[in-house]
Image (tube, rainbow, N blue to C red):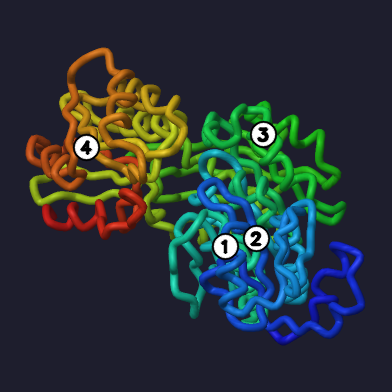
Amino acid sequence: MNTTTLYNLVDNLVIAKNSYKKINISGVKINSSKVKPGDLFIAISGQNFDGHDFIEQAIRNGANAIITNGRDMNIDPIPQIKVANPRKAASQISSKVYDDPSKDLIVIGITGTNGKTTTAYLTTQALKNAGYKTAQIGTTGIIAEGFIQNKTLTTPDALTLHSLFYKLKNQNFSHVVMEVSSHALEQYRVADIKFNIAVFTNLTPEHLDYHKSMETYYQAKARLFKMLNLDGIAIINADDLNGKRLASETIAPTLLFSKNNSNTIHFAESNIDLKGIKGSIKAGKDVYDINSKVIGEYNQENILTAVSILHSLGISKKSISNGINNCEQIPGRLESFELSKGCKVIIDYAHTPDAYEKVLGTLRELLKDENDLYVVFGAGGERDKNKRPQMARIAELFSNYCFITPDNPRNENLENINKDIISGFTKTNYKIFNDRAEGIRSAFRIAKRNDIIAILGKGREEYQDIAGRKRSYSDQKIIREWQ
């Protein structure tokens, strides 16, 4: 950012003092360890850390001013700007610092419990196929020409986002397709992003350790649709009751899609097998021919969502069909590998009961009666504990045998996580492993030709989060040993 004054940055947040016009600000930080001389430090309270505890470090590093949540920190002569919500302030200031870059891009925000990444990937590929310079932001990091794909939060913090949008604008990108998490909406990370299109996939129980109730979770998702202006478009899954509610609460024009309702954008015909999804999607008078290599009934819904987005943008029929059909696999989403012994391995990021039901139900349906389905899975530490036994119950229902392994235990005791998981089993067709790689190898050893091993939870992640450290680890690397 270019050097500006403290007055310019905070005059819309508080009644700014004239003395602030003489205080130059060369950067904005929310991490005290990254503060440099001349920076403005915004103290944000998080789940694990409170930025107010690091104000002294920020001042030692040269901060010229501090924004706080109203506490009197006794930091004179360093200016302290007290605001009601530092997260919201961070969003507003970030937008101002980078000259509101999202207004110069077409921004598509996708929210919902499941399907965000696949929908974003399909949409991005089709936009690129149509000739638009498009960036994708989400669980897999940023996917954009000329940018390093660093994996981060599903939706980055406000400062990172506006800085990224600024760079995208200056490098002549026209479209941004981004996953928008409920945490990001609740924490004002996207409060000052100008969304042209908001997309709702579905809502099932998830993140209830954070949101506490489904209603609170819904309200977080609903923020995205309340941010839309009259010139925006809300694209909504009409098969989800929460979608119908959203449609009644947004002021933007609404476009509905459904697997069941022919009055919306829908599949006029379709066929799903191990080779993929084939059929046609009808949107008013337009018909889009689909011959996709992705598998599973729920991917039918993701394709339908992506086509609805692209249809609303007026992309040509040929570009939409080619873009969807040319996506052979979505990284980390029902991604398929063949082992040398003739069995198939599927990795998927599924980490909710609903996603387990969709993924394992799909695989069981596509598997021949004489073959077996093995499931390797675990549960993230310091996350919703109630879903753990539910995932075990679903895995047991669809599989022949389960291999329980670590999956980002974080700072939670692995034994306690496993106890929660196995409480959902009614039989003993499972084994517990303290090493995920060994659990996967054990599944590979017993699988025979044409069996399927589903490895759930981590997708393309390349680490294990254990006791505050991210240790190098990849499910895919273990698979390559057996190919």
Mark with earlier residue (2, 1) = 2
The crowding category of the residue bearing disc 4, from other C-alpha atoms within 10 Å (few below 14, some 14 to 19, many at least 20), is: many
Secondary structure of the residue carrying numbered label 2: loop
- Pinpoint residue 43: horizontal percent, then vertical percent: 65, 60
* Foreground disc of the pair 4, 2: 2
- CA–CA distance between discs 3 and 1? 33 Å
Which image quarter holds the C terminus? bottom left
Q: In which quarter of the view is residue 74 placed?
A: bottom right
Q: Name which residue lies at 25% across and 56% down.
A: 473
Crowding near the residue tagged with mark 3, few <14, some 14–19, many ≥20 C-alpha atoms within 10 Å: many
- Whether residues under marks 2 and 1 lie with C-beta atoms below 8 angstroms apart, the answer is yes
**Residue pointed to by mark 1:** 54
Q: Nearer the viewer, residue 324 or 423?
A: 423
Residue 269 lies, in percent from the top left, at: 54, 36
Three-letter code, disc 2? Ala
Left or right side of 91 for 157: left
Q: Which residue position is annotated with label 2?
A: 43
What residue does disc 4 label?
452
Q: Is residue 38 above or below residue 307?
A: below
Identity, as a three-letter code, of the amino acid under mark 3: Tyr
Residue at 54% over, 63% down? 136
